[in-house]
Amino acid sequence: MMPDNYDGGTLDVEFVWTTGTSGSGDVTWGIEGFAVGNGGTLDYAQSGATEVIDTFIAMNDVHISTAGTLTLENSPSGGDIVQIRVYRKGASDTFTKTAKLIAVRLKYSIDSYSDV
């Protein structure tokens, strides 16, 4: 659920990941999502995915991708429920080993400094 002071704009997205194996290449992470307000339907079709490519650094290191920009579908606003799907697009990877997603950082803009 987005905070009440979320301005309904795009989200900056970063993927934090690691791997327990050595190798080389790039990992492609993707994300898509939509917002639903009170009385909205939860079967809204997701589209507008954002994909970010990140290069392998070293085994057991923390990898933080560059930021991508996600536009939530269905006219999001403050207080909406947000459904997000995160995936690895292995078909476009050049890193053939297992990549373990640790976290997804979402940054958003606000339209006020308080929910009060």
Image (cartoon, grey):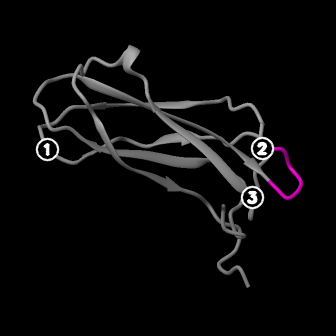
* Residue at image location 24% in from the left, 22% down from the top: 95
Identified at 58% across, 58% down, the residue is 108
Amino acid under disc 3: Asp
Residue 90 screen position, x and y as percent: 37, 20
Left or right relative to 50: residue 4: right
Task: Spot the residue most to the top.
Answer: 91
Range covered by the magenta-colored residues = 37-41
Q: Nearer the viewer, residue 45 or 15?
A: 45
Of pointers 3 and 2, the one earlier in the residue sequence: 2
Would you name the residue on which mark 3 appears?
80
How far across and down, in percent of the image, does residue 114 sit? 67, 81
Q: Secondary structure at mark 1?
A: loop
Q: Earlier in the sequence, mark 2 or mark 1?
A: 2
Quadrant for the N terminus, please.
bottom right
Which image quadrant for residue 72?
Answer: top right
Cα distance in 3D space between marks 3 and 1: 37 Å
Q: What residue did someone put label 2 on?
A: 42
Which quadrant would residue 50 be assigned to in this image? top right
Residue sitting at 16 percent across and 36 percent down?
57
Q: Which residue is mark 1?
A: 60
Q: Residues within 10 Å of mark 3 (few under 14, many from 20)?
A: many
Q: Observer-nearest residue: 39 or 71?
A: 39
Q: Could you say whether the residue bearing mark 3 is in a helix, strand or loop?
A: loop
Residue 89, percent from left and from top: 42, 23
State the residue in front, 81 or 65.
81
On whether residue 75 falls in the magenta region, the answer is no
| Left or right: 82 as drawn, with respect to 23 | right
2 vs 1, front mark? 2
